[in-house]
Amino acid sequence: MGNETIFYYVTEEAVTGHKRAVKLHFWQRMKFTSFVVEKNEMTVAAIMIPAVQKGWKSEKLLRLMWETAEKHPLYSGNIRILIQPDVQFLLTEQKHDVSETSKRLPQSVQSDTFLSIGFPMSEKILREQFPLQNRRCGPESVVLLLGELFFPEEQIRHFGEMIQPYLPRVNALTVIYGAEDSADQKTETELFHAAEMQSGTGAEMVSDSFQESGRLGEVIQEYTEELYYEYGLVSQILCGRDIPANRIQCGRNGLVKRNSLSGGQSPVLFLDYGYPDLKPLRMLKEGDIYLDVASSEEKEALFRRKYRGIFYQSPRKYLDTMVKSGYDK
């Protein structure tokens, strides 16, 4: 992400925590309040949208958003604009549909969703949680949840880059893909057994059903083979429907750990790239770390209600927290 500047449109209530409705008069010129927050080489210009008594007309709101951006001292032709879901709703009247809004934005401004910053901001979050300066700091057990929002190669490549500095400490990796109700549920659970891998035959022991799962299965297989040959890390690959209640987790050099992903009290790191099912959440234990790369609103709400003992973070939550903490009350 580098020194990229983000213009983030948020509701006033989301930042201040107070709900107020402004009464608009035709002779008044509305101006949106904005402020700048900087953190970790990232600059965010937060622009607050107040509620109005009779509701916003989408065209007027969009025009004011344009004007605010263009008059802002940090404005440039290549800025990245992010729109909070509640503001999207005001513009489109359909909370998760930003396609029409994107078409109406000025060509000089790049409109984007949270997926656009999901990868680089997730790396920032992970580095904060596990500082690279501390060589003894890092996850021992990792669960990778692959989704359908990104290309398989994108997910594996980004995951590989994020996790690479910690791989010498990782003893267990579980890769989960394909929810139970997915269209390509032809795949059986595949476990690369340590004894088979050590004999040189495990890499070839992939069933026909695994190969039928398509490109995603191939990408996972190639990556986990590389991990074994380079780090001695034996990976467990699960199709969503095959997530067991008591798991057997393979680790480095054939070490088998039963009933616990970590084999001890160390927290497990979950990296979710938009996995479409909630079934893996039953694997969570208090103290685990869950990084929701895809910034699912539904999952964030679920974690607030049911999983308070889990450290949950996402690019959306990270950005919202950053803006709230940087607001000068």
Image (cartoon, rainbow, N blue to C red):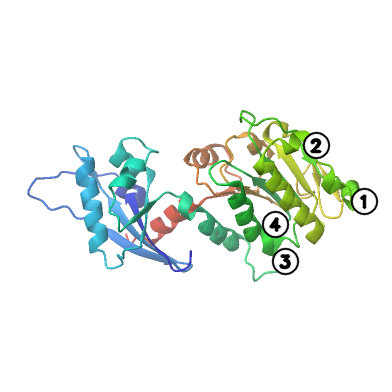
Q: Earlier in the sequence, mark 2 or mark 3?
A: 3
Q: What is the three-letter code of the residue carrying label 3?
A: Arg
**Dot 3 lies on which element?**
loop
Q: Which residue is mark 2?
A: 207
Q: Earlier in the sequence, mark 2 or mark 1?
A: 1
Q: Which residue is mark 4?
A: 139
Asked if marks 1 and 3 touch (Cβ < 8 Å), the reply is no
* Measured Cα–Cα span from mark 3 to mark 4: 10 Å
Q: Which residue is mark 1?
A: 199
**Dot 2 lies on which element?**
loop
* Quarter-of-image position of residue 101: top left
* Measured Cα–Cα span from mark 2 to mark 3: 38 Å
**Dot 4 lies on which element?**
loop
Q: Nearer the viewer, mark 2 or mark 4?
A: 2
Number of on-image labels: 4
Q: What is the three-letter code of the residue carrying label 4?
A: Pro
Q: Nearer the viewer, mark 2 or mark 3?
A: 2
